[in-house]
Image (cartoon, coloured by chain):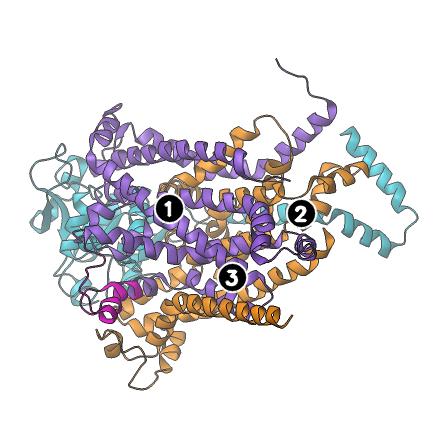
Chain colours: A cyan, B orange, C purple
């Protein structure tokens, strides 16, 4: 601190004789890096505080439509319909619909792995609540344990009403179960296919194993007319 | 004397032959990309390997279709801003750390540097989920900060600039020390300007990796207004499925700004010779 | 015996810590927290159907080390590195030296060699698949052969290595060019006056003065080649019979962590790879002290 004070004093001494323009150019030349750093920090702080206060972090519901043939992402009719139906207050939390995700888990390869990896990342981070995709694809993903076992724990009770739509798979992990377990809900006859045309040959919905809002998934199902 | 000149000319010709052959090899996918963008869908999936050129007319309108179906201006803007910030952050932090690792002595230097190396030794996939959780808990999803976040520091760049600083002659700094410059001044006024070409190559690398990064923007930006080119064009796959011409037209349009930036940057390279050549 | 630091040394150390602080803090938050997470996961049986981590001690290590698949993948990765690293570096060095001369069209060449770096990965994959296709491929059509370039286990690793070399030349070249530019021009002038010709100049000036850059590229490319993943994923289909003989260790990690959802096992594979690369890096650093020229 003492050194800094001395430095300031000596610099002021040096600047005394200069004109204003020369003062500025002296400072610009010798302290440009310092100035830049201070300005950067200032900008960053303002930006950060602004975002920290004004962004909505929580989700009501986050769903991904994998390989959908029509846009069902932000601003789609499907999303708007769900928001109206659920009555969620968007000024508090978000409702996210994403349809920019394309992969085929049954024959992975090519350049589509970025989609698959980001899909898995959103599931394992606990952000995604549900995903919809074609049946074969779905079963392949479900085998890895990323979707809830609909016959265990709370999920069994919560999703009991659509038992006749269950889709089963045999998990990779034999220690979990050696028989097929229900992991998905078949939505082939719903508006997703008939009205919105997202899939040609039917589709299955899975509830993320790490989902924090399974009740929103139930609401989505009832929005599609399943209850 | 004449035989010397003849030899020189032969040398030059040989150099060009080598370079032209290599250029051809390097250009194939790029040429394929542009040529496919000009074909009809039928032609693009033809299996005959010798149908290289479009033979049903050149379909320039593919570019128009793609341009109109995406908000390229927003995508360009987001991508270039992300690249800009990543390059600034990476160059700034890496040049400081590189100087310290390359030229200063402090206890624990080797241990800290091995941490830098370890970062490069693990597959990048393991970083994604924790980084996503950090960004989302800060409330920075769908923001420029969120896009730049993983690229704020660079282990590769730190190592690259450390190598650059180590290569500079010692006497330069000693002269400055006698003049009474402190370490900060020596760094900003003498050493940093001399590693400009390393900085340029770090800038190029950072920009290329940021441009190609598909996974991160796809995870943090769920909103079309905030996403980048690579992730924004992801929608393409769904809409156009296996229509290679449209996909390749989009890819070509996406690459254009990168090529322009590179041409500008590599001029810096050439100038680099002129300035540092005489000085040292 | 610990020596007491002088005032000047202390000041230097303070500057040193100040300068590395942003990078180190960033790396610890962005990268080391996830790495520790992975270390922890490698001792766990992870997340099936949302059940969370269960601590199982060294069981993952026992099964990874006992599995011949791990060692086969590690060997595949080493074989890949043996092609990519030397060829990628030598070709790039030659090109960089040629492009560092004052020749016509230098900027154009440099731009051309840069293009593969920004080319759409889908285009790169398509072109290589087309070149290597057994029936319709360009290579087999030109040479009138019927070679299964990427599905014959004996050849596939070389075919993949060639793609690796192709895609890395541009990167290495950019680094070599910047290294070449930091060599002062007057060294060459002095050598020309002494009558040293091109090749002699190359061996006596370029090679020693470029050795730090070369070492840097060797070191980072070895690490890069040993963590290769995208390339294999891009051109090898899951049904490819040559896959077990070609898949890299990171590919194996991906299979377990992402496809099968067995993250604990995947994390253990990462640990094995990390230890392997760390040993290799340590050896390289020792070699560096012996052979790399420092002025």
Q: Secondary structure at mark 3?
A: helix
Marks 1 and 2, how far apart in space?
31 Å
**Label 1: chain letter:** C
Which span of residues is magenta-colored? C127-151
Q: What residue sits 23% from the left and 53% below the top? A: C155
Q: Is residue A12 above or below residue B270?
A: above
Q: Residue at x 32, y 86 (%)?
A: B57
Q: Residue B181 in the image: x percent, y percent?
A: 78, 39
Please indicate, yes or no, whether residue C272 appears anywhere in the rendered image.
yes
Q: Position of residue B13 (x, y in %)?
A: 51, 71
Check if residue C133 falls in the magenta segment: yes
Observer-nearest of C263 and C187: C187
Is residue A211 among the parts visible in the rendering? no
- Depicted B19 relative to depicted C43: above or below: below
Q: Is residue C268 magenta?
A: no
| Residue at the disc numbered 3 | B80
Indicate the position of residue C158 as horizontal and vertical percent values. 28, 53
């Amino acid at each position: 601190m003492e050194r800094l004070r001395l430095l300031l004093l000596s610099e002021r001494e040096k600047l005394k004789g200069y004109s204003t323009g020369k003062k500025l150019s002296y400072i610009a030349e010798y302290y440009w890096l310092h100035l830049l750093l201070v300005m950067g920090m200032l900008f960053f702080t303002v930006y950060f505080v602004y975002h920290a206060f004004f962004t909505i972090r929580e989700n009501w519901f986050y769903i991904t439509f994998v390989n959908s043939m029509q846009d069902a992402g932000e601003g789609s009719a499907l999303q708007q319909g769900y928001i109206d139906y659920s009555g969620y207050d968007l000024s508090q939390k978000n409702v996210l619909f994403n349809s920019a995700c394309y992969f085929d888990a049954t024959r992975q390869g090519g350049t589509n792995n970025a989609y698959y990896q980001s899909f898995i990342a959103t599931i394992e981070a606990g952000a995604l609540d549900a995903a919809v995709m074609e049946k074969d694809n779905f079963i392949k993903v479900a085998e890895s344990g990323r979707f809830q076992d609909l016959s265990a724990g709370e999920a069994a009770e919560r999703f009991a009403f659509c038992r006749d739509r269950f889709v089963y798979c045999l998990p990779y992990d034999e220690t979990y179960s050696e028989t097929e377990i229900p992991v998905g809900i078949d939505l082939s006859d719903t508006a997703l296919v008939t009205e919105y045309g997202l899939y040609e040959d039917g589709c299955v919905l899975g509830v993320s194993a790490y989902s924090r809002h399974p009740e929103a998934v139930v609401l989505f199902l009832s929005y599609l007319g399943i209850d | 004397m004449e035989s010397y000149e003849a030899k020189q000319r032969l040398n030059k010709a040989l150099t060009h032959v080598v370079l032209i052959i290599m250029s051809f090899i390097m250009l194939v996918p790029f040429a394929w990309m542009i040529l496919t963008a000009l074909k009809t869908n039928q032609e693009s999936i033809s299996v005959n390997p010798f149908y290289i050129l479009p033979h049903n007319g050149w379909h320039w309108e593919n570019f128009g279709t793609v341009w109109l179906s995406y908000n390229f201006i927003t995508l360009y803007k987001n991508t270039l801003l992300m690249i800009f910030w990543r390059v600034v952050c990476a160059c700034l932090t890496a040049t400081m750390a590189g100087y310290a690792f390359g030229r200063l002595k402090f206890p624990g230097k080797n241990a800290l540097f091995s941490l830098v190396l370890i970062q490069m030794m693990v597959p990048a996939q393991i970083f994604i989920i924790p980084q996503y959780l950090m960004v989302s808990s800060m409330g920075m999803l769908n923001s420029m900060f969120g896009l730049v976040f993983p690229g704020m520091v660079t282990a590769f760049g730190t190592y690259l600039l450390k190598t650059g600083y180590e290569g500079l002659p010692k006497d330069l700094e000693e002269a400055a020390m006698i003049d009474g410059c402190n370490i900060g001044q020596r760094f900003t006024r003498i050493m940093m300007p001399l590693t400009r070409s390393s900085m340029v190559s770090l800038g190029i690398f950072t920009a290329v990796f940021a441009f190609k990064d598909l996974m991160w923007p796809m995870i943090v930006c769920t909103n079309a207004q905030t996403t980048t080119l690579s992730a924004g064009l992801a929608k393409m796959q769904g809409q156009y499925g296996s229509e290679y011409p449209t996909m390749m037209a989009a890819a070509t349009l996406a690459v254009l700004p990168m090529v322009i930036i590179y041409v500008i940057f590599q001029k810096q390279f050439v100038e680099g010779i002129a300035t540092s050549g005489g000085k040292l | 015996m610990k020596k007491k630091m002088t005032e000047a040394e202390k000041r230097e150390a303070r500057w040193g810590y100040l300068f590395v602080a942003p990078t180190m803090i960033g790396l610890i938050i962005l990268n080391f927290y996830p790495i520790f997470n992975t270390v922890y996961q490698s001792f766990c049986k992870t997340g099936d159907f949302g059940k969370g981590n269960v601590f199982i001690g060294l069981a993952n290590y026992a099964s990874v080390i006992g599995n011949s698949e791990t060692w086969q993948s590690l060997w595949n990765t080493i074989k890949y590195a043996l092609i990519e690293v030397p060829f990628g570096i030598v070709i790039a060095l030659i090109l960089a030296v040629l492009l560092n001369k004052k020749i016509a069209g230098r900027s154009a060449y440099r731009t051309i060699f840069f293009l593969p770096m920004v080319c759409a990965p889908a285009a790169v994959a398509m072109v290589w698949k087309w070149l290597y296709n057994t029936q319709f491929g360009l290579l087999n059509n030109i040479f009138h052969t019927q070679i299964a370039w990427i599905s014959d286990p004996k050849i596939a690793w070389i075919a993949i290595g060639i793609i690796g070399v192709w895609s890395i030349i541009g990167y290495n070249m950019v680094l070599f060019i910047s290294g070449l530019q930091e060599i002062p021009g007057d060294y060459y002038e002095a050598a020309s006056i002494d009558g040293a010709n091109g090749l002699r100049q190359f061996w006596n000036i370029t090679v020693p003065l470029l050795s730090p850059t070369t070492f840097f590229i060797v070191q980072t490319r070895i690490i890069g080649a040993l963590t290769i993943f995208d390339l294999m994923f891009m051109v090898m289909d899951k049904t490819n019979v040559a896959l077990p003989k070609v898949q890299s260790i990171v590919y194996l990690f991906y299979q377990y962590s992402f496809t099968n959802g067995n993250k604990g096992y995947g994390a253990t594979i990462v640990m094995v790879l990390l230890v392997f690369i760390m040993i290799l890096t340590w050896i390289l650093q020792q070699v560096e002290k012996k052979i790399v020229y420092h002025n």
